[in-house]
Image: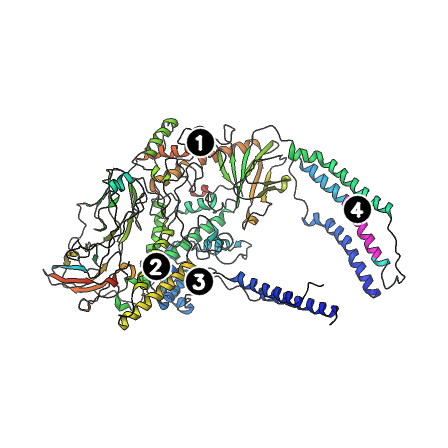
Amino acid sequence: MPTCSRSNQSAAIVALVILAIASGCRPERVASPGADAEAAHALKATLVSASSGAGAAAPAAATGTGWGSLTGRFVFAGAPGTPKPLIADKDTEVCSKAGMKLLDRSLLVDPSSKGLANVVVFARKTARVKEASPPSTPLVFDQKQCEFLSPVFAARVGQPIDVKNSDPIGHNTNISGSDFNQLIPAGGATTYAPKAETGMPTMVTCNVHPWMKAYMVFRKDGYVAVSAADGSFTIADLPAGEPLEFQVWHERSTGPNGALGLDKPDLKWTPKGRFQITLQPDEVKDIGTLDVPASAIGT
Amino acid sequence: MSRFSGILWSLLFLAVPVLGVATFAVAPAIDVWLPPDVSEHGKAIDGLFYFILALTGVVFVATEVALAWFLWKYNAAKAAGPATYIHGSHALEVVWTIIPAATLLFLAIYQMNTWADVKMRRPAMAPSVEVVARQFEWRLRYPGRDGTLGTPDDLFLVNDLHVPVDEDFLVQLKSMDVLHSFFLPNLRIKQDAVPGMKIPVWFKATETGQFDIVCAELCGWGHYKMKGRVTVESREDFDRWLESQYAKQEATQPEPDPSTAVARTE
Amino acid sequence: MTFETMHRRTSLAFTGLIVCLAALTGCGKTPPAYFRPNMVEATKQRLTPDQEKQVATILLAMFGTPDEPVCLPETGLDEAKLRLAAGPVRSDIVGRKNGLYREHCAHCHGVTGDALGPTAAFLNPYPRDYRPGVFKFKSTERADKPTHADLVRVLHNGIPGTSMPSFALLPVAQVEALAEYVKYLSMRGETELALMRAYFELDDDAQGKLPETREFLVDETLATVADKWKAAADAEIPVPPMPADIDLVASIAKGKELFYGDKANCVKCHGVTGLGDGQANDYDDWNKAIVEIGKELSSGAAAAREASTSGMSPEELSEHRAQLAWLDKFGKVLDGDALEPRTIPPRNLRHGIYRGGRRPIDLYYRIHAGINGAPMPAAKGTVPPEDIWHIVNYVRSLPYELDGELGADKPMLARDRF
């Protein structure tokens, strides 16, 4: 067999080995530490038992009397840059009317005061609420010229929201994570009362015009505020005499889940975007100008 | 080679025809034989099968036994004489070319009628159902009350083919994606579903019962489980079933009992 | 060396090589199946390895393994059905087939129900990921869970136009077991998400560990998930009957007006031809999550690259390095633990293929509540029920419509296709 030379054989063996290795290759999956089987076994025993656990009832939260207010102002210390235009390629006779461009509103900084708008501040847990039931006057959430008029919108759970469409074309408003994704015809409106808290703000989109984006946050106790154009915010009628922890959020924050962590040790500001204060009755606490560094805001 | 190994090799080769015949003889008893036939043309097809089996079987046994005998007789250890060099026998070669050729020609002509019955003499009727093969299921479309496929009253089903007994049944076979093969073992039907073609398949079922539809052309990872069920039933049962399925398809209210969402004839 | 020796040596060498290869490929037992953690969420929430381990331990205690499911009474699931569906394919002591999920479902939906089975990446559309607990084709209001009958119906009919096959030929008991196991995997996935998200909500004095108490795990977390499933049976959409004497031609004409009109806005996405060409750039919820993460990662990577390390303090530098490591890890997780995102085109209504079912009531459900997890919005509240029936009748006539936008001389789309 003249073709069965030694070099041919070695080449064949090498080819076989490479084929065998290559057939096993696939993208590496990131490893995760497995479960602790003994701990799981012990835990299962406690979960299956009918007893409600060894812990005593949670200690009654220290409560006070009276109500106070919290106010402050967010200021952006970096250079905001020019907002990018959105690609609005549908219904152009309304959405790009007369060449108008829709701009990305994720970082809105007031040119004169450097105030950072659309920062959300809400109380994480309160022992007391001033008004037990949500107000019945509806808030208005509107959309015009293919843009949601409120880029960040806060409401109380159970409070009616008039979701309006002031455009001559139809939209649908899709509040992700909720049961609301509804068609709203041109000039129409529908009322929605949120049934659950959102935790951190949730995104609102229109599926007919996918560039439309807003955020909504619903809180059970209603202690939530969105900073205005000049960066200022106020939360009124907060329970006084108890330690209150607040969560701060911004759409472009680099923190976990959008949390805005600032360097303010006097307010015990954590990297998870939380700070603590305790109010005296009838106190209007002004936590002052809060500088948001450029590093806290992503691109 | 020693004498002993020579005997061994001849016996080994003799085992081939012996075992071959033995397995065929035992097979029907252990249910490894042709599936029960419930179609009209199945008898002709099965008859052809047995005829060709008998013919080729005889030839097979004869040649194998001859081979084993030559191995035994001309074993090198025993038959130590020198080989004879001959030019070959022209007559012998002619004989053993002409006889098989004639046999094959005979078989070709003998089976033509059955082939024509199954594959060429399409009954003059509108399709009873359109079967679209798809990875990995059989999508069925019955023409509905107006008898025409492609109208709004069609009935759409998956994997659950019903056929009225003792009636000609014409299937329009298509494929939605790749090659499949519509195989009804108990009806002796097998036809490749070729993408882009509408292939007519017809048969007449002679007994009621539930039988398999399987895919006989490798079509992907799910080929092995591309199974359907063909139910042969009386004309009244078939009509009643069609009506009930159509009513379900046109439902404008939810089903009254959740368990009826799963139609069963198990 | 003679030719014979060389030949014999070569043959021996090759035989030896093949025997070795054969032995190696057979060596080692198959490891038992295990649930894959939701790495995308774990990385998104920046969980530490200890926290990932705690979540895995809690889930092992609450839900067990793919071979041995645990069924807490709060879930409301039937343990016997779960046992039928779980584990490797085998026969039990009375000869019933077990391991149904692994036999029929796991190769697409994954052992964990995470749509990361070996076949998943090759399918279009992707198989369902049960972990967010979102299901598209059901008879309940948009954000509610499917009823048991909805799941059984999907198993029975399959989903036409996708790779989800019909399991109509399986015995009832097996289909019921599979539906129950799907609910189990969904509850497990939702509990996993809730636990992973709970780390962010912890107070700082919890030291990054979740409380392993019955109140928190069962009464709060699991009950929130399980109650939604139990409530599904009561959340069925009330469907007013279509009038028996309805004039179909008039209804279809009215439906066509609504389809093209401004109230229902169907043509905006489904296109003026009904071919689904009104839009091509939206995502369903499962893919959108990956797209959003991808955007965040690329902007984070750009920011990290631009940041100059020269002026940083030691804490800032370590934070910067941690951020880079996290971005790198997340990139790997998206490679190995997530499917390539795909846009979801609006349905081509001329095909006559309806994924959620072709009965008029199925189309009513789709239009009334929209499709959960997909961009299809709800017409409820905007379009009154009688009008929804008109739209249903029009949609059902679309595959056979001759004088629509396509014109009478164009070939009809549904007649020759399925």
Question: Does residue A61 show up?
Answer: no
> Residue extending furthest right?
B81
Residue assigned mark 1 = C400
Q: Is residue A100 above or below residue B145?
A: below
Q: Which x, y percent locates residue B230? A: 57, 40
Q: Residues within 10 Å of mark 1 (few under 14, many from 20)?
A: some
Q: Amino acid at mark 4?
A: Val
The numbered dot on residue A29 is: 3
Q: Nearer the viewer, residue C132 or B91?
A: B91
Q: Which x, y percent locates residue B50? A: 73, 42
**Disc 1 + disc 3, Cβ < 8 Å:** no
Which is nearer the N-term, disc 2 or disc 1?
Answer: 2
The Cα atoms of the two marked residues, 4 and 3, are separated by 61 Å
**Disc 4 + disc 2, Cβ < 8 Å:** no
Residue B57 on the magenta segment: yes
Q: Nearer the viewer, residue C7 or B212?
A: C7
Is C210 on the left-hand or right-hand side of B126? left
The numbered dot on residue B58 is: 4
Chain letter, disc 3 residue: A
The Cα atoms of the two marked residues, 3 and 2, are separated by 18 Å
Residue assigned mark 2 = C297
Q: Is residue C291 above or below residue C347?
A: below
Question: How many numbered dots are placed on residues in this image?
Answer: 4
Q: Which x, y percent locates residue A111? A: 17, 55
Q: Residue at x 34, y 29 (%)?
A: C254
Whether marks 4 and 3 lie on the same chain? no
Chain letter, disc 2 residue: C
**Disc 3 + disc 2, Cβ < 8 Å:** no
**In front: mark 4 or mark 3?**
3
Whether marks 1 and 3 lie on the same chain? no
Q: Which residues are magenta?
A: B55-70
